[in-house]
Every structure is written in C-alpha cells, then in structure tokens.
C-alpha cells in the first residue's frame, strides 16, 4: 500500500501534461502500473535521452531501481532527481536511502564564501563564510558562528559557539552529508533527529 501511495501523486501530476509530450514516460507509467519495473526503467532511460535531467523521470527511475533491489543505483538516481528539484524524490530518499553514503571529497568547499539554498516550500537562501574550520552565517541581520567538525567522506557537523548558543538556546544537533557535487556547488542532506532537510551550497 505504501508503494502505491508514494507513486500516486507524481502520476496524477504527470497525467496533466499534454498527451504526446512524453511518449516513453507514458509507456513507463503503464509498466509501473503493471509492476514491470525493468521495462519501466528502459522506457525512462529513453525518455531521459530526449529530456535529460527531467526530475520526474529521474524520480520514477530511482524508485523503480529500488523496487527491484538495485538500491545503490536507485539512491544515486534519486539524488539526481532531488538536485533537479523533485519534491517526490526527497520523500522517498529520506525513507529508503537515509543510510546511503556517496563518499565524496569536499576539500574545495572547506574555505571561502558560499550561498545556501534550503530546498523547501519557501526555498530560503542566505550566505555564509568558512575560514579555518569556523563557519560564519548571516541571517536576518544576525551572525551565527560555529566550529566545523569534518567527519570524512563528505560528512560534517557544526558545533555552535557560546555567543550563538546565547542567541539560540536550543541549538539543534545535526549531521550534514554531501550527496552530489556539480562544479562549484553541492547538494546536501541535513539529518536532525528524525527530520531530513535538503539544500544546495554554492561557492561564490
């Protein structure tokens, strides 16, 4: 039942497209309905040849790969779908791939000036700096500072300093994992208790 619930919303959204926009996508929807996920992946790949980086196509492909026990491939595909702004992929990734680790090298992002976009309904954007393992964040005319603890393999956490803890007494504890690097930006997931947040960090 959960599989059907997760798939039904994107299918409904897709059905509103013009009938002949996505011939292979339409075939893939029929394959998924018939639970022929291998055929669905084949048709989704054909659709990606015509519409590279289409987030809906990447979402369905990643989910289908996970269904047939190709979890690593599926998680990688869902990451691409999230990068290209698929909200459906975020939900499935948080459920199925929370333990997946791409093991990326993020050395070039350890110092400099950056912008951060939180991929949410509001799509919040703000800027920050990193220097000598210290991160300085500016948001709503306030400066928040914390020490970056690099955990390796693209994982890190930020420990707030005393002044920031005074501004934010309930400073959350979280770990950030880098999921995808594309030129001068990376996609991350922030894991806080049972909550998962996705965002983009761009080096300016």
Image (cartoon, helix red, strand yellow):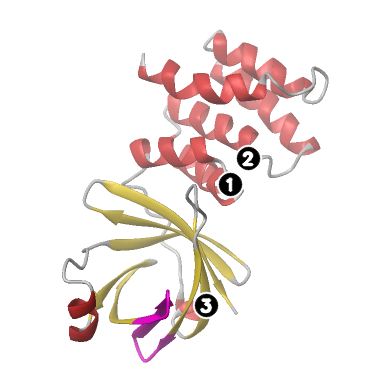
Which residue is at the front of the view, 90 or 39? 90
Q: Are marks 2 and 1 in contact (CB under 8 Å)?
A: yes
From the image, state whether disc 2 or disc 1 is nearer to you: 1
At label 3, counting other C-alpha atoms closer than 10 Å, the crowd grade (few under 14, some 14-19, many 20 or more) is some
Q: Is residue 191 magenta?
A: no
Identify which residue is drawn at 42% across, 80% down.
141
**Measured Cα–Cα span from mark 1 to mark 3:** 20 Å
Q: Name the residue under label 3.
A: 114
From the image, state whether disc 2 or disc 3 is nearer to you: 3
Residue 73, how many percent across, how many down? Answer: 50, 40
Give the dominant element type of the magenta stretch: helix, strand or loop.
Answer: strand
> Which stretch did the figure color magenta?
130-143
Identify which residue is drawn at 34% across, 86% down.
133
Please tell me the numbered disc located at residue 85. Answer: 1
Asked if residue 77 is positioned above or below residue 25 in the image, the reply reads below
Asked if residue 91 is positioned above or below residue 184 in the image, the reply reads above
Q: Mark 2 points at which residue?
A: 55
At label 1, counting other C-alpha atoms closer than 10 Å, the crowd grade (few under 14, some 14-19, many 20 or more) is some
Residue 169, how many percent across, how many down? Answer: 16, 71
**Measured Cα–Cα span from mark 2 to mark 3:** 25 Å
Q: Is residue 139 magenta?
A: yes
């Amino acid at each position: 039942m959960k599989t059907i619930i997760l798939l039904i919303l994107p299918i409904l959204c897709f059905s509103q497209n013009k009938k002949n926009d996505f011939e292979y996508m339409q075939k893939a929807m029929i394959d998924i309905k018939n639970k022929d996920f291998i055929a669905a992946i084949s048709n989704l790949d054909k659709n990606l040849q015509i519409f590279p980086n289409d987030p809906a196509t990447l979402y369905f492909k990643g989910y289908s790969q996970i269904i047939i026990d190709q979890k690593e491939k599926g998680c990688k595909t869902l990451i691409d779908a999230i990068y290209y702004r698929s909200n459906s992929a975020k939900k499935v990734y948080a459920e199925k791939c929370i333990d997946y680790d791409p093991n990326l090298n993020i050395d070039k992002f350890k110092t400099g000036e950056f912008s951060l976009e939180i991929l949410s309904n509001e799509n919040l954007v703000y800027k920050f700096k990193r220097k000598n393992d210290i991160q300085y964040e500016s948001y709503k005319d306030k400066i928040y500072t914390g020490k970056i603890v690099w955990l390796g393999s693209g994982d890190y956490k930020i420990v707030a300093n005393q002044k920031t803890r005074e501004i934010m007494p309930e400073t959350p504890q979280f770990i950030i994992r880098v999921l995808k690097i594309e030129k001068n930006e990376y996609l991350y997931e922030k894991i806080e208790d049972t909550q998962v947040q996705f965002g983009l960090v761009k080096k300016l």
